[in-house]
Image: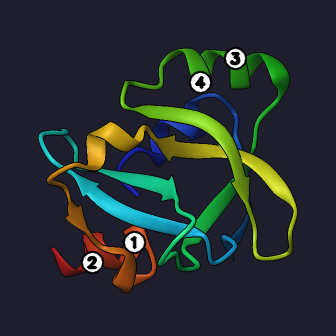
């Protein structure tokens, strides 16, 4: 993925590919370079979205979080297993007018089709 190099530069290790609980909607955020996904937890019409889990040590996690640009945030993402992990979410205001891509099931599928 386009920004995985940032994780690798901090010594992150890929752990697994999994899916969220069926409570999320996925958007392609307009005006971001490179294009970025916006994952929003939704009480209605949510779906499971494929995501990647990466492991970072505490120091690297702090540096990573400090560089996350608005409207993205690091928050609690609920997996299909019911476990919560820290991950990228998007502030809801930012998806107004954004292209909803929930039906594609993942950011990777969106990028592959672009």
Q: Is residue 38 above or below residue 65?
A: below
Q: CA distance from mark 1 to mark 4?
A: 21 Å
Mark number displayed over residue 108: 1
59 or 97, which lies in front?
97
Q: Secondary structure at mark 1?
A: helix
Q: CA distance from mark 2 to mark 1?
A: 6 Å
Q: CA distance from mark 3 to mark 4?
A: 5 Å
Name which of mark 1 and mark 4 comes first in the sequence: 4
Q: Secondary structure at mark 2?
A: helix
Percent of width and height locating residue 59: 78, 16
15 or 98, which lies in front?
98
Q: Which residue is mark 2?
A: 112
Contact (CB < 8 A) between labels 1 and 3?
no
Name which of mark 2 and mark 4 comes first in the sequence: 4
Contact (CB < 8 A) between labels 2 and 1?
yes
The residue drawn where x is 28% and y is 49% is: 95
Q: Which residue is mark 3?
A: 62
The residue drawn where x is 55% and y is 14% is: 66
Q: Is residue 16 left or right of residue 110?
A: right
Q: CA distance from mark 2 to mark 4?
A: 26 Å
Q: CA distance from mark 1 to mark 3?
A: 26 Å
Callout 2 crowding tier (Cα within 10 Å): few <14, some 14–19, many ≥20: few
Callout 3 crowding tier (Cα within 10 Å): few <14, some 14–19, many ≥20: few
The residue drawn where x is 54% and y is 74% is: 49
């Amino acid at each position: 993925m386009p920004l995985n190099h940032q994780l690798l530069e901090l010594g992150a290790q890929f752990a697994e590919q999994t899916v969220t609980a069926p409570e999320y909607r996925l958007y392609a955020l307009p005006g971001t370079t490179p294009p970025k996904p916006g994952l929003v937890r939704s009480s209605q019409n949510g779906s499971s979205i494929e995501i990647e889990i990466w492991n970072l040590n505490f120091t690297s996690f702090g540096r990573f979080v400090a560089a996350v640009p608005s409207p993205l945030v690091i928050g609690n993402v609920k997996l299909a297993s019911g476990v919560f992990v820290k991950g990228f979410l998007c502030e809801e205001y930012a998806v107004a007018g954004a292209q909803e891509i929930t039906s594609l099931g993942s950011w990777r599928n969106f990028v592959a089709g672009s």
